Image (cartoon, grey):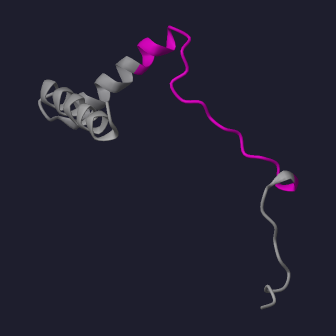
Amino acid sequence: MNGNEIIAEIHQQRERLTCACGHDVKKLMDYYRRREKERDNTGHELVSYVQPEAADKAPCALREEPPKK
């Protein structure tokens, strides 16, 4: 399965869900919230939040002067 087939499958599933909800955004969001609560009960984390690094460990550097050419 290549990338285009995966994207097409995502679009098909999204269209199926929106049709099932009568193209009503409120019903669709209620469906997603209900599914999220069901997932919460399984202990499976839907999103993992990455904690920002401390400022002193940040991979960027601030320059006091513009770079010399």
Magenta span of residues: 36-56
Which quadrant would the N terminus be assigned to in this image? top left
State the residue in front, 6 or 15: 6
Give x and y (percent) for residue 48: 60, 30
The reply, left or right, for residue 2 in relation to residue 44 is left
State the residue in front, 26 or 17: 17
Q: Answer with the quarter of the image where residue 43 lies.
A: top right
Which quadrant would the C terminus be assigned to in this image? bottom right
Query: Is residue 37 within the magenta segment?
Result: yes
Q: Which residue is drawn at 50% across and 24% down?
A: 46
Q: Which residue is drawn at 81% across and 71% down?
A: 62
Give x and y (percent) for residue 44: 54, 15
Q: Is 8 rendered above or below residue 68?
A: above
Q: Residue at x 55, y 21 (%)?
A: 45
Q: Is 67 rendered above or below residue 36?
A: below
Q: Which residue lies furthest to the bottom in this view?
A: 69
The reply, left or right, for residue 41 in relation to residue 38 is right
Give x and y (percent) for residue 50: 66, 38
Magenta: main secondary structure:
loop
Q: Is 65 rendered above or below residue 54?
A: below
